[in-house]
Amino acid sequence: MKITGIELRRIAMPLVAPFRTSFGTETERDVLLLRVVTPDAEGWAECVAMTDPLYSPEYVDGAADVLRRFLIPALPTHPDAHTVGRALHPFKGHRMAKAALETAVLDAQLRTTGQSLAAFLGAAKDRVPSGVSVGIMDSIPHLLDTVEDYLHQGYLRIKLKIEPGWDLAPVRAVRERFGDDLLLQVDANAAYTLTDAPHLTKLDAFDLLLIEQPLANDDLVQHAQLAKLLKTPICLDESIESAEHAAAAITLGSCSIINVKPGRIGGYLEARRIHDLARAHGVALWCGGMLETGIGRAANLALAALPGFTLPGDTSASRRYYATDITTPFELRQGHLDVPTGPGIGIDPIPDILEEVTTSTEWITL
Ligand code: OSB
Ligand code: MG
């Protein structure tokens, strides 16, 4: 496949409500989109890097820089999704930037052949159950109102963001108000240390599905020690940046569940490797999110339809994030989102809306 050029486009997407985690508060998503142009098709991808390097070392200006200076110039003359990964391998890290480039090439390739990303990856279902990630709030009543509203909309699982000072009380309040049948889990975004273990064991009383990333990103050994002390299963997010990390975490007993975010691990091909590895080891998976627009969401839904994704993901409806998405919005139907069936990621940006939210574009001729 010959690529004639690649567009880097920045868009500003205001969130419907501020989203607070243990690492910061997001009010607007500054998104980098890639458009790969070939004689036969265009491929789209969304880079999940955030404005500041707080979730991981990557950030959106850095992703754009490494793409234009190193990754795009290293592309083979006639790339396909598999050769892209090999060409980018010498460059250390920058997995979110690499994922975006590989995904845009893969999308162009699949649109050329007419195959959907879901079919290419090996999807086993046509809709996926939706959970929702609920940020840290200013008060428990505000949290309970927010959770109630999401449950009325049909979300099948609730994830509460936690941090020291906002953990036992919100979890207890949500459990008491909505009952024992509610599928409930928490995400600490690396806010604790192993010395907090006695405190974290108090979460065991609330029958949570999992606790996500309680300790620091590179604390695989300490997560394994914590896992021995907690009844609540440990799920890793930030710690898993590749299939090798997943293998290490499984071997060490650092987690029994993995939150797979294709951006964090370098793309959908690596996500499929983790899928196959985890499945062979009986480690459960679910698809996480990075507050994506419809472009990133479409591709994540294809992945979430693989058979090893046995828990509801953070793949929520478009309106949970944005009043106006750049694609046809994804809507919740009986707590599920449909997996796109069209060629490639199966959805396109709506040109007028895309123009309205664009803050800059850059064209790189190949
Ligand atoms: O840790 O899963 C996370 C959003 C941005 C960065 C990190 C995380 C999240 C979420 C929201 O929890 C997931 C989503 O709904 O897209
Ligand atoms: Mg997380």
Image: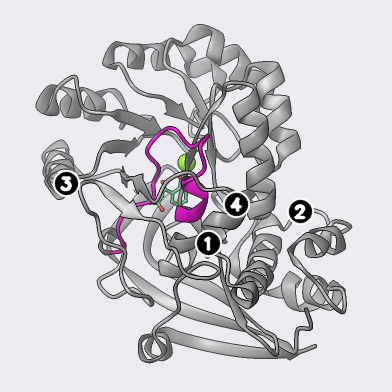
- Distance between the alpha carbons at the discs numbered 1 and 3: 24 Å
Residue at image x 14%, y 44%? 142
Q: Quadrant of the C terminus?
A: bottom right
Q: Quadrant of the N terminus?
A: bottom right
> How many numbered discs?
4
Dominant SS in magenta: loop
Query: Element under label 3?
Result: helix
Residue 121: mark: 4
Give the residue type at disc 3.
Answer: Thr
Distance in Å between CA atoms under marks 3 and 4? 35 Å
Give the residue number, with chain letter if any, for mark 1.
50
- SS at mark 1? loop
Query: Label 4 to label 1, Cα distance in Å?
Result: 26 Å
- Identify the element where label 2 is drawn: loop
Which residue range is magenta in the image?
301-318
- Please give the label number shown on residue 146: 3
Q: Position of residue 225 (x, y in %)?
A: 61, 12
Could you tell me if the residues under marks 3 and 4 are in contact, i.e. CB atoms within 8 Å? Answer: no
- What distance separates the C-alpha of mark 2 from that of mark 1? 16 Å
Query: Which disc is residue 290 wearing?
Result: none
* For the residues bearing labels 1 and 3, Cβ distance under 8 angstroms: no
> How far apart, in angstroms, are the residues tagged by discs 4 and 2?
24 Å
> Is any part of residue 181 visible from this angle?
yes
Q: Mark 4 or mark 1: which comes first in sequence?
A: 1
Q: Amino acid at mark 4?
A: Leu
